[in-house]
């Protein structure tokens, strides 16, 4: 019977020069593909675009839930698709579909209302539906060029480089757009970002790949899922990431909508604050490898969790009439970005350590699905509450006046405090078990 000790990672079959070339191509693929992901996940571009087309806050918030919705629906089936058509065909299809979705969003503004809003939402959905198919190929692709000892440095450098690139680009774009950007300017940005997805495919094509063997009987999706479910540390980590996503994923887009619709900040200020969030991401990724070596996931994950609580409470109690309000919001957004990047690096490290070598694609899909359930629930719940008008516009307690957005921030802070009880599910905190767990 084959054991994990005798498993030979694909990357170990390459020499240093070949692995270095593969890592460079991996970096380059993220530099081209990251614009679309960052724009839909962290930038205010899409939020401003929908707002200029007279979309409601509910519609705007709903659009931010599409990445998680697509991941829930397609990540595990995507693992089966990859096993049938291969890694290269899978990411190629993802890049082409994603490009089409972005171009649909860009051209939607040429149509009259409400067709333009329908096409924007449809294009956003199409792009996000392409992401799970790429996601389930990414970690198996990295398995071909990364040794376990190279993971921490790679993830930190990769995310630092693409976030530095996108943050700088979006900051320059905000300067060019000004306070009241024309719709055509946002259309151009979205269209260019869509075309750049083809650059992702170009560099992924140049990475060495050891395709999983496709047997005639086909991929046993159910058996792969059963193997994953029996991996108790992986399931525990999945539950924790789901809960932390439920309590934190809506904080960034809700802040952008809060600034635009409640505080009445102009487009330039909103975009700058989203850039400050990305700077927090960048700094966190820059120091990621050193922090992981010194503190490990065991200490970094709880620290990040506590930082989320501080940010949510700060957003809940910060009144927009106080002096230097935007400076305080900027500090909170920086900390939120730092904690988010920290969580993402811990996520990647635990995934690579928990996934059995013969089941990495399904393990990645399973964990991504759970994480996305949390993110979708957070943003869909927020969208529903805003759309249904379930919260009073303003209320006062203890001399402090809260708006409906601040009420939601307070709710998420309470959830985050409650979910501190689940930290024992983090595998690195309780590492001794009989299940598969190979940290770096």
Image (cartoon, rainbow, N blue to C red):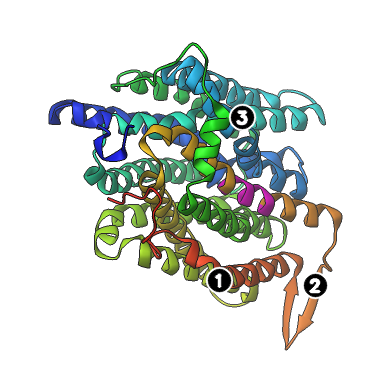
| Residue 77 relative to residue 276: left or right | right
Q: Nearer the viewer, residue 47 or 311?
A: 311
Task: Tell me which label, 2 or 3, sits earlier in the chain.
Answer: 3
x then y, percent, for residue 113: 81, 30
Q: Nearer the viewer, residue 243 or 56?
A: 243
- Cα separation, mark 2 vs mark 3, equals 37 Å
| Residue 97 relative to residue 283: left or right | right
Could you classify mark 2 by the number of other residues whose Cα lies within 10 Å: few (under 14), some (14-19), or many (20 or more)?
few
Q: Check if mark 1's residue and mark 3's residue have beta carbons within 8 Å.
A: no
Q: Residue furthest front?
A: 1
x then y, percent, for residue 168: 39, 44
Magenta extent: 371-378
Q: Secondary structure at mark 3?
A: helix
Number of the front mark, 2 or 1: 1
Seen in the picture, residue 134 relative to 176 is either above or below; the reply is above
Q: Residue furthest left?
A: 16
Q: From the image, tell me which residue sits under label 2.
A: 394
Q: Residue at position x 46%, y 25% from top? A: 197
Q: From the image, tell me which residue sits under label 3.
A: 129
- Cα separation, mark 1 vs mark 3, equals 33 Å
Q: Quadrant of the N terminus?
A: top left
Could you classify mark 1 by the number of other residues whose Cα lies within 10 Å: few (under 14), some (14-19), or many (20 or more)?
few
């Amino acid at each position: 019977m084959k054991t994990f000790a005798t498993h030979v990672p694909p990357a170990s079959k390459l020499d240093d020069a070949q692995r270095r070339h593969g890592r460079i191509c991996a970096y380059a693929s993220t530099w081209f593909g990251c614009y679309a992901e960052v724009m839909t996940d962290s930038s205010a571009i899409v939020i401003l675009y929908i707002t200029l087309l007279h979309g409601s806050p509910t519609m705007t918030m709903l659009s931010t839930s599409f990445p998680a919705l697509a991941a829930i629906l397609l990540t595990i089936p995507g693992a089966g698709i990859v096993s049938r058509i291969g890694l290269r065909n899978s990411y190629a299809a993802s890049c082409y579909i994603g490009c089409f979705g972005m171009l649909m969003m860009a051209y939607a503004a040429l149509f009259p209302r409400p067709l333009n809003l329908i096409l924007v939402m449809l294009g956003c959905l199409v792009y996000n539906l392409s992401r799970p198919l790429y996601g389930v190929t990414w970690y198996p692709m990295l398995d071909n060029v990364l040794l376990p000892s190279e993971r921490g440095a790679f993830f930190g450098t990769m995310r630092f480089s693409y976030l530095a690139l996108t943050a700088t680009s979006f900051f320059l774009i905000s300067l060019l757009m000004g306070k009241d950007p024309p719709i055509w300017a946002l259309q151009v940005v979205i269209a260019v970002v869509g075309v750049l997805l083809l650059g992702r495919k170009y560099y992924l094509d140049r990475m060495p790949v050891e395709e999983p063997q496709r047997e005639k009987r086909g991929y046993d999706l159910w058996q792969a899922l059963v193997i994953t479910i029996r991996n108790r540390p992986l399931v525990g980590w999945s539950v924790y990431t789901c809960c932390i996503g439920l309590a934190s994923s809506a904080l960034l887009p809700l802040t952008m909508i809060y600034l635009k619709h409640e505080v009445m900040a102009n487009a330039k200020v909103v975009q700058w604050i989203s850039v400050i969030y990305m700077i927090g991401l960048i700094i966190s990724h820059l120091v990621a490898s050193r922090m992981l070596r010194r503190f490990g996931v065991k200490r970094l994950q709880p620290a990040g969790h506590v930082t989320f609580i501080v940010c949510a409470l700060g957003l809940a109690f910060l009144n927009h009439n106080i002096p230097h309000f935007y400076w305080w919001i900027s500090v909170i957004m920086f900390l939120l970005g730092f904690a988010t990047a920290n969580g993402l690096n811990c996520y990647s490290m635990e995934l690579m350590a928990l996934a059995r070598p013969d089941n990495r694609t399904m393990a990645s899909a399973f964990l991504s699905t759970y994480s996305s359930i949390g993110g979708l629930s957070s943003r869909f719940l927020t969208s529903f509450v805003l759309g249904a008008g379930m919260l009073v516009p303003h209320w006062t307690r203890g001399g402090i006046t809260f708006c409906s957005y601040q009420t939601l921030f307070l709710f998420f802070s309470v959830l985050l405090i409650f979910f501190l009880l689940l930290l024992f599910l983090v595998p690195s905190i309780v590492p001794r078990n009989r299940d598969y767990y190979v940290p770096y």
